[in-house]
Image: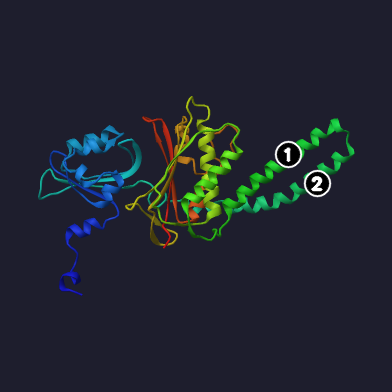
């Protein structure tokens, strides 16, 4: 090993190794330096960012943030969960703006994914659902007895009277399906993971949803064919995608020109801290399910992955909670964003790359 290689990395090398976006801005708020993570998060190369006004690249939804950046050049700013518009994308990010005491007016700006590390308390959700899962197991036994009794009664009734017993069996089946979902949510042991082809899972989910749809909705694919295999459970990933694509279909099918867009891409700068494992997990593979429907009720957007929360009239509120659990069990993360300007709803899944 050479003497140069044995020494500490240069400052520029250290900045390049950061997993969060770092931008250096001058007193006129023009971008003077960016690291590779900033290029990935913003979606532009350094050549296209250097010299641009920071507030032209990052459009903040909250005016007070803009006012503080413009008016208080010597004050430090820390904000979490900010809504930021980057080109045609609405993202949720954590922001810091730090002044440089020896260089008045110059500031260092950092951005990180607002969903990094999963929100505190999410890891407790499985344990919170273990009680209902145990209760669900106990309920299934009498349900089976009720269904069997209804079928026996039906044999002794006239044809015209069997509709009531049919109603009983149908409702028992519906409740049993609900209980199955509750049990899956409370399951502690995740499904085993292995390398798999993401696009094969997406196509399998699309075929399933299309075959079951009475009202067809156009699905546009924008895939990166060069993506490497992801680490996940194929059955669980297909189920996640079926739920998301089905929800997208239901959300936009009444629009004049309904459309679903499925995108995949490689995002090298995204890192998530999986606290339950005590280690950081890189999640560079992204699959996005978007629809041009009206979107989720704003009052529910911060809670859509919680059990028993639903914006559907007859929704049970377990579909997205199960999606969240299955993605998390694969060491992945899922996020939801609404682009009001463009009229699109985006669900993004980030998964680890197979080793």
**Residue located 47% across and 41% down the image:** 303
Q: Give the SS element for disc 2.
A: helix
Q: Position of residue 206 (x, y in %)?
A: 53, 43
Q: Position of residue 320 (x, y in %)?
A: 52, 43
Mark 2 closeness class: few <14, some 14–19, many ≥20 residues within 10 Å: few
What residue is disc 1 on? 170
- In contact (CB < 8 Å): disc 2 and disc 1: no
| Residue 322 makes an appearance in the image | no
Of callouts 2 and 1, the N-terminal one: 2
Residue extending farthest top:
256
Q: Tell how many labels.
A: 2
Front-lying residue, 122 or 151: 151
Horizontal side, residue 221 vs residue 85: left or right? right
What residue is disc 2 on? 148
Q: Position of residue 316 (x, y in %)?
A: 59, 39
Horizontal side, residue 167 vs residue 25: left or right? right
**On-image quarter of the C terminus:** bottom left
Q: Give the SS element for disc 1.
A: helix
Front-lying residue, 234 or 157: 234
Horizontal side, residue 28 vs residue 229: left or right? left
Please, which colouring scheme is shown?
rainbow
**Residue located 35% across and 52% down the image:** 270
Residue 19 lies in what quarter of the image? bottom left
Mark 1 closeness class: few <14, some 14–19, many ≥20 residues within 10 Å: few
**Residue located 27% across and 35% down the image:** 59
């Amino acid at each position: 090993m050479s003497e140069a290689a044995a020494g500490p990395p240069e400052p520029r090398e250290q900045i390049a190794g950061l997993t969060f976006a770092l931008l250096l801005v001058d007193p006129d708020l023009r971008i003077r330096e960016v690291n590779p993570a900033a290029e990935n998060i913003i979606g532009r190369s350094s050549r296209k960012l250097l010299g641009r006004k920071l507030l032209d690249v990052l459009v903040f939804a909250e005016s007070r943030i803009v006012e503080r950046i413009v008016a208080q050049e010597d004050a430090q700013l820390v904000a979490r969960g900010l809504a930021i518009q980057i080109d045609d994308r609405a993202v949720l990010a954590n922001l810091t703006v730090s002044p440089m005491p020896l260089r008045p007016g110059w500031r260092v700006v950092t951005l990180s994914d607002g969903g990094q590390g999963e929100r505190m308390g999410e890891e407790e959700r499985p344990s919170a659902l273990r009680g209902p899962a145990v209760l669900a197991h106990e309920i299934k036994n009498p349900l089976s007895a009720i269904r069997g009794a209804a079928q026996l009664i039906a044999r002794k009734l006239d044809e015209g009277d069997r509709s009531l017993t049919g109603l009983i069996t149908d409702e028992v089946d519906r409740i049993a399906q609900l209980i199955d979902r509750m049990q899956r949510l409370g399951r502690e042991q995740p499904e085993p993971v292995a390398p798999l082809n993401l696009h094969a899972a997406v196509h399998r989910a699309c075929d399933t949803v299309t075959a079951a749809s009475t009202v067809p909705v156009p699905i546009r694919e924008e895939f990166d064919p060069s993506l490497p295999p992801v680490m996940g459970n194929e059955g669980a990933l297909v189920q996640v995608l079926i739920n998301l694509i089905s929800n997208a279909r239901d959300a936009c099918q009444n629009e004049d020109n309904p459309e679903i867009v499925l995108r995949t891409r490689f995002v090298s700068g995204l890192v998530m801290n999986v606290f339950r494992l005590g280690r950081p997990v890189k999640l560079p593979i992204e699959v996005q399910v978007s629809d041009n429907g009206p979107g989720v009720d704003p009052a529910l957007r911060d809670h859509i992955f919680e059990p028993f929360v639903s914006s559907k009239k007859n929704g049970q509120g377990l579909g997205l909670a199960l999606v969240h659990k299955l993605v998390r069990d694969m060491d992945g993360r899922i996020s939801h964003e609404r682009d009001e300007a463009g009229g699109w709803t985006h669900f993004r899944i980030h998964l680890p790359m197979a080793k």
